[in-house]
Image (cartoon, rainbow, N blue to C red):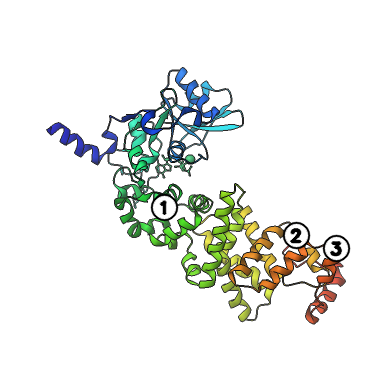
Amino acid sequence: MIRKFISRVLGRKNPANRAEPAIIAVGQHGLKRDEISRGCRHTVESLQESGYQAYIVGGAVRDLLAGLTPKDFDVATNATPEQVRQCFRRSRIIGRRFQIVHVNVGSETIEVTTFRGHHSDNGSSKGQTDEQGRLLRDNVFGSQSEDAARRDFTVNALYYDPASETIVDYHHGVADLQQKTLRMIGDPKTRYREDPVRMLRAVRLAAKLGLSIDPAARRPIREMAELIDNVPPSRLFDEMLKLLTSGHAVRCITQLREEGLHNGLLPLLDVILEQPLGERFVMLALEATDRRVAEGKPISPGFLFATLLWHEVLAKWDLLKGKGEPPMPALFLAMDEVLHVQAGKLAITRRIAGDIKDIWALQPRFEQRSGKRPYGILQQPRFKAGYDFLLLRAESGEVDEAMSVWWTEFLYGSDEARAAMLLPPQPGEARKRRRRRRPSGDAGQTPGVAE
Ligand code: ATP
Ligand code: MG
C-alpha cells in the first residue's frame, strides 16, 4: 500500500512515471480502424511489419472519438527518423531542431514523429528554458510513456493501434473526453510556463470539441496571460490563424475575452471590441467565417485580419485626415501604422499583409460611382474580397446600406443596367479626373492601389 501511495505521489509529480497505461478495447471507445485514412494505416502497418512500435496519435484520435473529421493524421513511433525514412520510398526528413518524417502515400502526407523524451527531470534545467520557464529545446527521443507525458492535454495523449483496435491511454484521456473535460497533463502552471501557446490551445480545443477546461487548467490563465508576449510572433500568428479558422472563431474569441487573453494577442483587439461598431463588425466577420468553414469553403487569412484591424485603421485614418492629410495618403499611412504595430507581436506574412492592404485600399474607392471608375474597380484583382468587406461594413452599420446595394446591383447588372446606374460626376471628381488624364490617359486608377 505504501508503495502504491509513493508511486501515486511520484506519478502526480512526474506524469512520465506512470509507466502502466490503460489499454482500452474497441468496445469501450468505439473507434474503428476503417475510420483511419488508408495512407495512415499503411504507414503504421509498414512500421509495425518492420518491427517498430507505431500508433496514430494526437488530434486525429481525439477528433474521431469526439465524432469529428480529423484535419490530418499523425503517427508516433519508436523508430528514429532515419529508420522511418528507410521504410518508405516516398518520404523525407524535415526540420532541424526536431526531425520528423513526411511519408507520402498516394495524395496523402503522413507526419511521423519519433517518441520524444524528457528534456530534464524537473522540466526546467538550465539552458533548456528561458528565464520565464519557456522551453527552448524539446528534441530528445524517449519512450512512449515519456512521449505521452510531454503532450499538452490528456485527450491529446491517446495512441491508437489499428492492428488491435486498442487505445493506449496513459492519462485517462478517453474518460476525460467522455466527460467533456479538457485536462492538462502535469501541473498546468509549469506547462503554461514551458509553452504559453498552450493557453490558446486550451481555448481553441475546448471550443472546437465542446469541452470545458478543467478548473485547475483554467484558473492560472488569467494571471499568466502576459507570458504570451514572450512567444515568437510567427508562432503566435500560426496559432491565431488556427483559432480564427477553426470553425468556432466566435466561441474562441468570446472565451479568449472571458479568460483575459485577448489583449496579449492582438494588442488592439480589446480596443476594437470596446467600440460597439467595431465589435459588431468583428463578430459579423467571425460568424461569416464560421459559416464558411462549416460549408467547407476556403478562408482567406488576409480578409480575416483585415476585418480584425479595420476599426483601428478607421480611427487612425480619421486622426490623420483631421490633421489635414489628404484622404488617400492618410489611409495608406494609417494602414502602415496599424500593420506596423501588429508586426511586433504577430508576424503577418508579407503576402497576407499585401492582401489586407488591397482590401482596405479598395474601401474608399467604392464611393466612386460615376464615370468609368466603377468599371476599373470591378477589374481589381481583389475586388471580390473588397466587395465582401464592404457588405460587412454596411451590415455592421458603418456605411450606408445604399452603397453596398448599389455595388451588388452594379456587379450583377447587364451592361445597359450598369450604364444607367452611374451617378453624375461630383464637381471635385470631374476636375481631378481631367487633371489626371493628361499625363496617363487612364481615368480608372487610384495611385498605389492597383497591383
Ligand atoms: P489540430 O490539428 O486540430 O489543430 P492538434 O491537437 O492535432 O489539433 P497539432 O498542432 O496538430 O494539434 O499537434 C499534434 C499533437 O501534438 C497534439 O495533439 C498534442 O499531443 C501535441 N502538441 C501540439 N502542440 C503541443 C504543445 N504546445 N505542447 C504539448 N503538446 C503539443
Ligand atoms: Mg493535428
Q: Callout 2: few (<14), some (14-19), or many (20+) C-alpha neighbours within 10 Å? A: some
Between tags 3 and 1, which lies in front?
3
Residue 55 place in picture, x, y as percent: 43, 28
Task: Looking at the image, tell me whether mark 3 or mark 1 is earlier in sequence order.
Answer: 1
> Secondary structure under badge 1?
helix
Q: Nearer the viewer, residue 82 or 161?
A: 161
Residue 154 place in picture, x, y as percent: 35, 41
Residue found at the far front of this picture: 27
Residue topped by disc 3: 415
Which amino acid type corresponds to the residue marked 1 in the rendered image? Answer: Val
Residue 52: in sight, yes or no? yes
Q: Which mark is residue 382?
A: none
Q: Is residue 289 left or right of residue 223?
A: right
Q: Quadrant of residue 118?
A: top left
Residue topped by disc 1: 203
Which amino acid type corresponds to the residue marked 3 in the rendered image? Answer: Asp
**Relative to 46, residue 405 above or below:** below
Task: Looking at the image, tell me whether mark 2 or mark 3 is earlier in sequence order.
Answer: 2
Residue 115: in sight, yes or no? no
Where in the image, quadrant-wise, is ligand 1 located? Answer: top left
**Relative to 24, residue 247 above or below:** below
Residue 24 place in picture, x, y as percent: 34, 30
Q: Residue at x 57, y 73 (%)?
A: 316
Task: Looking at the image, tell me whether mark 1 or mark 2 is earlier in sequence order.
Answer: 1
Q: Quadrant of residue 441?
A: bottom right
> Secondary structure under badge 2?
loop
Q: Nearer the viewer, residue 409 or 120?
A: 409
